[in-house]
Structure formats: C-alpha cells, structure tokens
Amino acid sequence: MSPIVFNTWNDNMQIMAENDGLVCEQGVPNSGQVAVLAVLKMTAEQWEVKKADLISLGASEANEPVSRYLLEPEVNINVSRGRFVYEDGIVHYVSSTYLAPWIR
C-alpha cells in the first residue's frame, strides 16, 4: 500500500477532515484495497454529541477488539463500516476492525 489522495467517501467520518483532524488513507491503486486512519481532538462533551448522532443513525457499541469501540452505521453496501474510539480527548477512526488494535 502507498499513500493516496484522501477521498471523502464516508459521511460519518467527514467531521475528521473538516475540523483539522489528521486523516491518512493508503491503498493499492485500482484495487479497492484502502485503509483509512484518522484522529481529531474533541472534548468529551463534543464526543458524546457526535456519538449520540452516530448511534441514532445505527452505530453500535462494543468492547472488542478495543474498549469503548463504536462500529459506525451502515453507509453503503460497497463500503466497509469504520470504527470510532474516543480516548484522552481524541477521537480515533479506523476503516477496519483489523486496524483497531493500533489504537492505544
């Protein structure tokens, strides 16, 4: 995989790009293989509002593979569901469960 231009294909994590978050997207050109990692500073209160919004759209909470894990709502049949974790004032987003253990 190599860095590719960020493509805002997912409305649920668009907040990361629009609010000066750090977004990294890597992939294999013309393959559909893409990994997205993003972080955004956010207060606990801001996260609770965003989390409630995501849950109202169909997100679900879990404690696997990391604690306080939020599986985003279904966004498109052809797009994998990303995951959010809030910890120490930072919202982390990963595009796959396989990337979740990288979150501290």
Image (cartoon, rainbow, N blue to C red):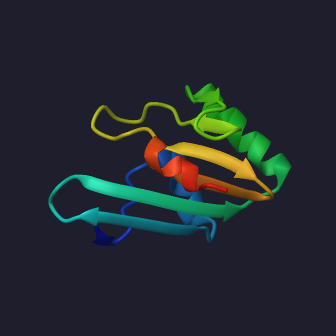
Query: What's the residue at 67%, 56% (across, down)?
Result: 104
Query: What's the residue at 54%, 64% (across, down)?
Result: 17
Which residue is more in the foreground, 46 or 102? 102
Which residue is more in the foreground, 38 or 48? 38
Which residue is more in the foreground, 101 or 3? 101
Q: Is residue 22 above or below residue 51?
A: below
Query: What's the residue at 68%, 54% (across, down)?
Result: 91
Query: What's the residue at 47%, 47% (across, down)?
Result: 11
Residue, far left: 30
Q: State the image coordinates of residue 86 (x, y, percent, origin top left).
A: 72, 49
Q: Is residue 54 above or below residue 92?
A: above
User: How many labels, in total?
Assistant: 0
> As drawn, is 17 to the left or to the right of 47?
left
Which residue is more in the foreground, 6 or 101? 101
> As drawn, is 47 to the left or to the right of 22?
right
Q: Quadrant of the N terminus?
A: bottom left
Q: Is residue 100 above or below residue 25?
A: above
Q: State the image coordinates of residue 70 (x, y, percent, origin top left).
A: 62, 36
Q: State the image coordinates of residue 99 (x, y, percent, origin top left).
A: 48, 51
